[in-house]
Image (cartoon, rainbow, N blue to C red):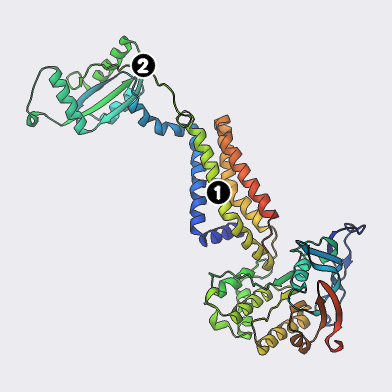
């Protein structure tokens, strides 16, 4: 059981009331579970620009969602609002209690420490409350870096790394947090199809084995169509389609 | 430990900001420890320029421990300061004493194996008390061992007006230290906030910025509060400055969006 936290602004009544409780039963089933996060009539604007304009959205456990749309459609604002980085000016957001469900993000600008090595950047994710010891963390680190073929380049400083390596490091850093939800903003923008597929395969593996939920924002609709998951298409701050890619 | 480690690592990435913070923190801690007494460290220099106390010179053989004599003299009421003189100054004083006695001697004949002291007395000391001090010095060193010059009583120079800074040295120093601390925190708060944000995204920790700043600045806060308990009202500007700086950057950091 875990609690849902609510962010809300605007005219809706009773939004600060009791948190709803949801059953959580990870690891026993691969089918989509109960509602994990939701947005109801969410509006976010910056200096008069409506970045999100009445967005309704639900994310369920074990769900993979591709968020598509052209640049400026509101994908990044959508992810940041869902992550709690931006507060909505109107509407309601429900999130699970972060003590029980950990949400980690892959940012579009990656947010890596430029003057540190790739390995040190990965150690940002070392949390003694998650890992029994550093060896366990290092074992995960080695496994993931080998899967993405960057193990031999971990000594490089981020400022000396190419775009693809940076993106893989940012992805691995997120996965090393052992998240329950991943909010990925263009995580493969600097990668070719094969590498993007490899990243999707890892996410898919975590999705099946550990019940990971993913929201993957991309402006490349064709890429999203090749993967399995629900597709949500945004335009001008609104969700204009939500369903399987084959129906677009 | 995580927060201290985080603070140190963040500092190592910005050595200039770190140095500024460390310098201001050390200054504040020294001021807290010394309190208003720190002003006395400048007082000596000023006193030399504006000498108003009667004084006399004394020379004695080097075999007599002038440090010991100084300590004993300072225990007497009416003795304000005792300076141990350099060899060159002793030589000059010997010549001065000899010339006062109308004795002219060749430089080579002057024995420099003497130690010299200058004893500065309280301005309002009676002549009889001055004699007592001189007698005590004679007893300390031995009757035939010490030669004392006459007591000189310089005219009291009336200081027309002192500047605000020289009158309120400690206050000025505390304000400057508080301002330096405010600037130093200003240099570190933003990078600390940005790095805290990143760590919060990848670890199950919240409010890293708030906790790091609180834990690492706590010793400074404790230092100034303790000093306020000891030195009372004179520490208020420093306590005020440190508390204001911390509160300002804690609130600003919490409100500031870095993403």
Residue at horizontal 68%, vertical 85%?
A: A196
Residue B173: x and y in percent read 49, 37
Quadrant of the snapshot with the N terminus of chain B: bottom right
SS class, disc 2: loop
Residue A232: x and y in percent read 82, 79
Query: What is the tally of numbered marks visible in this picture?
Result: 2
Residue B109 placement: quadrant = top left
Of A48 and B216, the residue lying toward us: A48
Q: Is residue B259 above or below residue A140?
A: above
Q: In the image, which disc is placed on residue B183?
A: 1
Using the numbered discs, state the Cα–Cα distance from disc 1 to disc 2 in whole angstroms.
45 Å
SS class, disc 1: helix
Q: Is residue A27 above or below residue B206?
A: below
Residue A228: x and y in percent read 79, 86
Residue B13 makes an appearance in the image: yes
Using residue B161 as the reference point, say whether residue B223 is left or right of it.
right
In this figure, which residue is indicated by the disc labeled 2? B123
């Amino acid at each position: 059981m875990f609690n849902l936290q609510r962010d809300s602004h605007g005219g809706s009544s009773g939004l600060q009331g009791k948190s709803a409780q949801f059953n959580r039963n990870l690891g026993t089933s691969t089918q989509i579970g109960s509602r994990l996060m939701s947005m109801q009539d969410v509006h976010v604007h910056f200096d008069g620009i409506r970045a999100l304009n009445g967005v309704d959205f639900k994310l369920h456990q074990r769900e993979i969602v591709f968020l598509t749309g052209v640049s400026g459609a509101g994908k990044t604002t959508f992810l940041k609002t869902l992550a709690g980085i931006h507060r909505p000016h109107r509407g309601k957001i429900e999130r699970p209690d972060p003590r029980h469900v950990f949400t980690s993000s892959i940012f579009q600008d990656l947010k890596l420490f430029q003057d540190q090595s790739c390995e040190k950047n990965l150690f940002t994710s070392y949390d003694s409350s998650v890992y029994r010891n550093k060896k366990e963390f290092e074992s995960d680190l080695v496994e993931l870096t080998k899967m993405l073929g960057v193990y031999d380049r971990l000594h490089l400083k981020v400022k000396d790394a190419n775009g693809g390596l940076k993106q893989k490091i940012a992805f691995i850093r997120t996965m090393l947090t052992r998240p329950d939800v991943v909010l990925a903003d263009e995580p493969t923008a600097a990668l070719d199809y094969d590498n993007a597929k490899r990243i999707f395969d890892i996410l898919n593996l975590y999705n099946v084995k550990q019940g990971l939920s993913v929201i993957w924002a991309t402006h490349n609709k064709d890429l999203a169509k090749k993967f399995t998951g629900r597709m949500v298409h945004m335009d001008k701050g609104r969700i204009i389609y939500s369903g399987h890619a084959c129906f677009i | 430990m995580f927060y201290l480690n985080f603070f140190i690592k963040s500092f190592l990435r910005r050595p200039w900001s770190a140095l500024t913070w460390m310098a201001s923190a050390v200054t504040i801690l020294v001021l807290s420890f010394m309190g208003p007494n720190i002003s006395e460290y400048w007082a000596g220099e000023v006193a030399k320029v504006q000498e108003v106390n009667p004084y006399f010179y004394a020379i004695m053989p080097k075999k007599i421990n002038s440090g010991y004599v100084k300590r004993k003299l300072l225990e007497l009421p009416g003795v304000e300061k005792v300076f141990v003189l350099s060899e060159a100054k002793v030589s000059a004083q010997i010549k001065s004493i000899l010339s006062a006695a109308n004795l002219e001697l060749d430089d080579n004949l002057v024995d420099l194996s003497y130690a010299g002291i200058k004893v500065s007395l309280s301005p309002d000391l009676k002549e009889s008390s001055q004699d007592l001090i001189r007698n005590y010095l004679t007893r300390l060193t031995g009757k035939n061992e010490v030669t004392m010059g006459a007591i000189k009583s310089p005219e009291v120079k009336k200081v027309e007006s002192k500047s605000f800074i020289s009158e309120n040295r400690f206050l000025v120093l505390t304000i400057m230290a508080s301002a330096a601390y405010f600037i130093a925190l200003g240099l570190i708060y933003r990078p600390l906030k940005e790095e805290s944000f990143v760590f919060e995204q990848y670890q199950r920790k919240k409010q890293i910025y708030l906790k790091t700043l609180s834990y690492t600045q706590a010793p400074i806060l404790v230092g100034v509060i303790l000093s306020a308990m000891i030195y009372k009202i004179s520490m208020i500007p420093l306590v005020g400055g440190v508390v204001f700086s911390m509160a300002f950057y804690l609130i600003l950091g919490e409100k500031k969006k870095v993403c």
